């Protein structure tokens, strides 16, 4: 049986893992390579790392960090943040990423999804979608939620699937960083309208939140703070889920 | 003592970094050497060949053709020499692939590569899933029965002879996850991404098979 994936997410600046609340008040949580190694050894099913400050100078260090991480882990690695064109995708895959996540560049230029999946295969193209409620509608937002786009969430999710995305990384900006649980309502709407895997992201604070995330039919559950702060070990989360009857890799 | 030569084919179908590193770690201090195959090669000068692959069947076949690898690889396989194909590297052992367009495969293990048909399934089949052994074998000797490996694919080996299937996995229905004919192995999952069990499988293939 296919297992629900538990995915720690590293928000990275250069080679440091950071955490901010709603993308503000950023603080350093640790060294990216060390943390990646630790998660790989302690039972993570996959790792996600995002360059959250992809300026030209930071980018070089970030790519080196990707290379270093790819050398020390043997679980899949998804990398994103600041991916703007095909050459960024190729560079990250060459650095050792297994999947590359595209976000605002896909909103700006949806054709990029098709081009990338034709060149590298759908299996390594993840489209990250940031969703937010605005005037009673679910909208796609960019720039950490600061900019509301014209895209409606559900039609956009369907469109990225038809353009060849292999997976959706779905973050609710309404719940991200506040540890009150995933946005079940938003996630269920997305998982029921696409047939590609959906990773739930944004808002985990307790063990039960992971279980509620599983109930949305998301096949990957992403979390950052609860792991980085050592509130929960990955094994603890998996044992809990397993006790609730959720298939996990123990 | 003469070193055994392992060939790792770079079919320009995804990154070979992880598998390259895994092999290097395994053969360190042992009488093996690793050579990367990127073009036509002398098929008699390799003891083992590993072909990892991601992406589409048609793409990998056309890349191998461009690199002039198909002909020596076919001779190597017809000679029943030791081979491990990973994901699409396993799929192209079949007669035909039906991804994107109909593509003729290497025709070493009879069968076709077709998409999961169940409309209710989330596709690609992505994540960790269990392998169930049909029979024991040297490369799966370390109690791999019911262990999880990392999969990412939308197409499966169909119309294969039951005797060529070493292990199967359940996703909607049973599909072959490890196949074997003579000295030729194929795995649908990615052992290089499957943590310790995956590394043990590569190790067994290199050192024991």
Image (spheres, coloured by chain):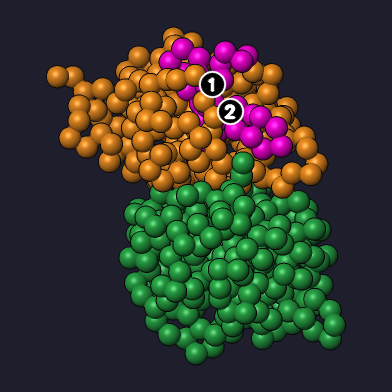
Name the colour assigned to chain B in the rendering.
Answer: orange
* Cα distance in 3D space between marks 2 and 1: 7 Å
Task: Tell which residue pokes out farthest to the bottom in this image.
Answer: A25
Residue B122 sits above or below residue A147 on the image: above
Residue B118: image quadrant is top right
The residue depicted at 30 percent of the width and 32 percent of the height is B34
Q: Is residue A66 visible?
A: no
Q: Is residue A119 left or right of residue A18?
A: right
Q: How many marks?
A: 2
The residue depicted at 46 percent of the width and 62 percent of the height is A236
Contact check, label 2 and label 1, Cβ < 8 Å: yes
Please give the residue where the numbered disc 2 appears in the rendered image: B168
**Is the magenta region chiefly helix, strand or loop?**
strand
Q: In the picture, which chain is green?
A: A
Magenta stretch bounds: B161-189
Please give the residue where the numbered disc 1 appears in the rendered image: B134
Residue A110: image quadrant is bottom right
């Amino acid at each position: 049986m296919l297992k629900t994936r538990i995915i720690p997410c590293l928000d990275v600046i250069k080679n440091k893992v950071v955490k901010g609340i709603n993308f503000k008040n950023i603080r350093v949580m640790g060294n990216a390579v060390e943390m990646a190694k630790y998660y790989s050894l302690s039972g993570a099913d996959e790792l996600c790392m995002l360059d959250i400050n992809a300026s030209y100078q930071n980018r070089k260090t970030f790519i080196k960090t990707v290379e270093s991480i790819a050398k020390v882990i043997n679980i899949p690695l998804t990398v994103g943040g600041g991916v703007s064109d095909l050459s960024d995708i190729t560079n990250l895959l060459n650095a050792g990423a297994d999947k590359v996540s595209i976000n605002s560049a896909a909103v700006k230029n949806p054709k990029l999804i098709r081009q990338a999946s034709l060149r590298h295969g759908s299996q390594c193209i993840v489209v990250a979608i940031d969703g937010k409620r605005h005037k009673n509608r679910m909208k796609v937002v960019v720039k950490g939620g600061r900019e509301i786009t014209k895209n409606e969430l559900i039609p956009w999710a369907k469109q990225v699937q038809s353009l060849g995305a292999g997976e959706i990384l779905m973050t609710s900006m309404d719940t991200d960083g506040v540890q009150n649980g995933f946005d079940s309502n938003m996630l269920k709407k997305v998982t029921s309208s696409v047939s590609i895997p959906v990773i739930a992201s944004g808002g985990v604070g307790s063990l039960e939140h992971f279980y509620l995330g599983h109930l949305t039919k998301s096949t990957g559950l992403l979390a950052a703070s609860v792991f980085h702060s050592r509130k929960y070990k990955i094994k603890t989360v998996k044992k809990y889920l397993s006790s609730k009857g959720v298939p996990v890799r123990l | 003592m003469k070193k055994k030569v392992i060939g790792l084919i770079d079919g320009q179908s995804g990154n070979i970094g992880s598998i390259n590193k895994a092999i290097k770690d395994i053969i360190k201090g042992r009488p093996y050497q690793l050579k990367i195959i990127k073009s036509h090669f002398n098929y008699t000068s390799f003891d083992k060949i590993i072909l990892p692959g991601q992406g589409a069947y048609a793409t990998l076949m056309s890349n191998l053709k461009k690199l002039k690898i198909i002909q020596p690889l076919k001779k190597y396989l017809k000679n029943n020499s030791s081979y491990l194909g990973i994901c699409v590297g396993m799929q192209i052992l079949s007669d035909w692939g039906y991804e994107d367009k109909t593509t003729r495969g290497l025709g070493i293990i009879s069968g076709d590569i077709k998409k999961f048909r169940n409309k209710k399934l989330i596709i690609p089949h992505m994540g960790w899933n269990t392998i169930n052994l049909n029979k024991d074998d040297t490369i799966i000797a370390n109690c791999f029965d019911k262990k999880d490996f990392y999969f990412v694919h939308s197409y499966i080996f169909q119309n294969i002879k039951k005797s060529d299937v070493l292990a199967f996995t359940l996703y909607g229905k049973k599909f072959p996850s490890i196949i074997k004919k003579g000295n030729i192995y194929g795995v649908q999952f990615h052992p290089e991404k499957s943590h310790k069990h995956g590394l043990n499988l590569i190790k067994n293939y290199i050192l024991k098979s």
